[in-house]
Image (cartoon, rainbow, N blue to C red):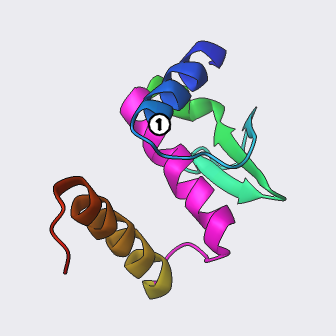
Amino acid sequence: MEYLIKEACKFLEETQYNVKFPIKVVKFEREAILGQAHENTILLSETLFSMGKKEIVSTIIEENEHLVTGMKDFTRAFQNHFINLFLTEKEERFGLFL
């Protein structure tokens, strides 16, 4: 698990995404929970590590963004935040601004 976290963080660093919070692996009571933003820490489920690096990276980004914004799961505000994050990255990478 430690190796996969390092690999995920390496990818995020190389793609200029800043993970601002520490990461801790935990066992959630509900297996369906893959991650959680809790007390300025990114919590990752043990179950997540059987799903591959892409899912680990996705979960780290999601939980990091919850902590950065304070926005909750399943909200339009959080969905808009992710869309804006994506579009801003495209604007900056290609020099085309909306």
Q: Residue at x 61, y 76 (%)?
A: 72
Closest to the observer, 40 or 94: 94
Magenta span: 52-75
User: On screen, 21 above or below 40?
Assistant: above
Above or below residue 25? Residue 67 is: below
Q: Amino acid at mark 1?
A: Leu
Q: Position of residue 95 (x, y in %)?
A: 18, 62
Asked whether 84 falls inside the magenta stretch, the response is no
x then y, percent, for residue 44: 65, 40
Instruction: From the viewer's side, name the closer residue of 49 and 12.
Output: 12
Give the image quarter of residue 22: top right
* Residue assigned mark 1: 12
Quadrant in the picture for residue 67 = bottom right
Q: Secondary structure at mark 1?
A: helix
Q: Is residue 41 left or right of residue 96?
A: right
Give the residue drawn at x 35%, y 74%.
84
Outermost residue, top direction?
3
Instruction: Assign the magenta stretch its main secondary structure.
Output: helix
Residue 65, placed above or below residue 77: above
Q: Residue at point 65% right, 65% down? A: 68
Give the percent coordinates (x, y) of residue 26.
Answer: 75, 36
Percent across and percent down for residue 4 are: 54, 19
Q: Local crowd at mark 1 within 10 Å, few (<14), some, or many (≥20)?
A: some
Q: Quadrant of the C terminus?
A: bottom left
Q: Residue at x 68, y 49 (%)?
A: 20
- Left or right: residue 68 versus residue 82 is right
